[in-house]
Image (spheres, helix red, strand yellow):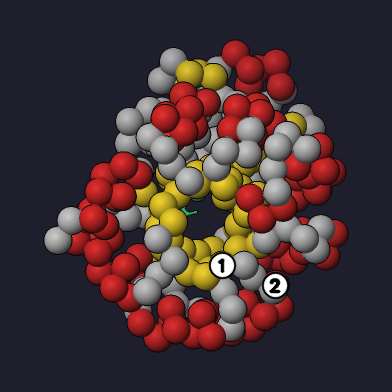
Amino acid sequence: MLIFAHRGASGYAPENTLKAMALALELGCEAVELDVHHADGELWVFHDRRLSPKSNGKGLLAQQSSSYLRQLRVEGEPIPTLRQVLELIEGRMTVNIELKGVGCVEPFIQQYPQLLQLGYQPEQLLVSSFNHLWLKQVKQQLPDVPVAPLLEGIALNQAAVVSELKAWSLHLDISFINRELVADAHQRGAKVYVYTVDDADDIRALAALGVDGIFANYPDKAAAALTQE
Ligand code: G3P
Ligand code: CA
């Protein structure tokens, strides 16, 4: 099972920071997940629309200047750009880029060729979003990019979502997972990655359901859970 360090190794370091990404590398993770917003022509790795309370800034991230965002801190760590994170990782992990904020699709499409050149194979930059229209735009402009629709509940149209987007994987909430959903996705050629899972019993139960991966805040403990009874 592929274990994504969720927002970096966020159980141990401030989420979505270079420190959390470096720690995921140190822990030997194969994959990492992060969240992206757009502001001032740049892509910023941060989870929330609002800068407070996760950083020492105020207001909506999307309305700020780059110079303001650069001086902010998340528990003492800077808010990195997507480019900075990918420069740090240098292709040593698969990176799941979750497009979170309004307006991040166009800059992502524009930056993609340069981002890829930072040491990645196309299948190593997996783009996900709860906004499936954004994924459709990505797929139309960049057909080689693996895309992954995020679902929060059980979708009546899971089959259509997978086939229309030619999805690499479906990212499902642990609260709604069941054997039928996993089998349906697999039958359509999509992997199933489940968020966000830190409980050892949950992890083993998901493995038994045949899911292909999970998002974990403590990726080392998740890996250990899989080797224990
Ligand atoms: O990508 C899986 C998970 O990160 C989605 O939810 O709120 O943690 O971004 P959230
Ligand atoms: Ca996320």
Mark 2: which amino acid?
Answer: Leu
Which image quadrant for residue 147? Answer: bottom right
Q: Is residue 41 shown above or below 30?
A: above
Name the foreground residue: 43 vs 10.
10
**Mark sitting on residue 169:** 1
Instruction: Please give the name of the residue rendered at 60% of the width and 27% of the height, measured from the top-left corner.
Output: 88
Residues under numbered marks 2 and 1 in contact, where contact means CB atoms less than 8 Å apart: no
Residue indicated by mark 2:
165
For disc 2, does the CB lie below 8 Å from ligand 1?
no
Instruction: Please give the name of the residue rendered at 81% of the width and 58% of the height, measured from the top-left corner.
Output: 142
Residue 10 in the image, given as x and y percentages of width and height:
38, 36
Question: Count of labels shown?
Answer: 2
**In what quadrant of the picture does the C terminus appear?**
bottom left
Residue 63 in the image, given as x and y percentages of width and height:
69, 32
Instruction: Please give the name of the residue rendered at 78% of the width and 38% of the height, measured from the top-left corner.
Output: 117
**In what quadrant of the picture does the N terminus appear?**
bottom left
Mark 1: which amino acid?
Answer: Ser
41 left or right, relative to 14? right
Q: Measure the C-alpha gap from mark 2 to mark 1.
A: 10 Å
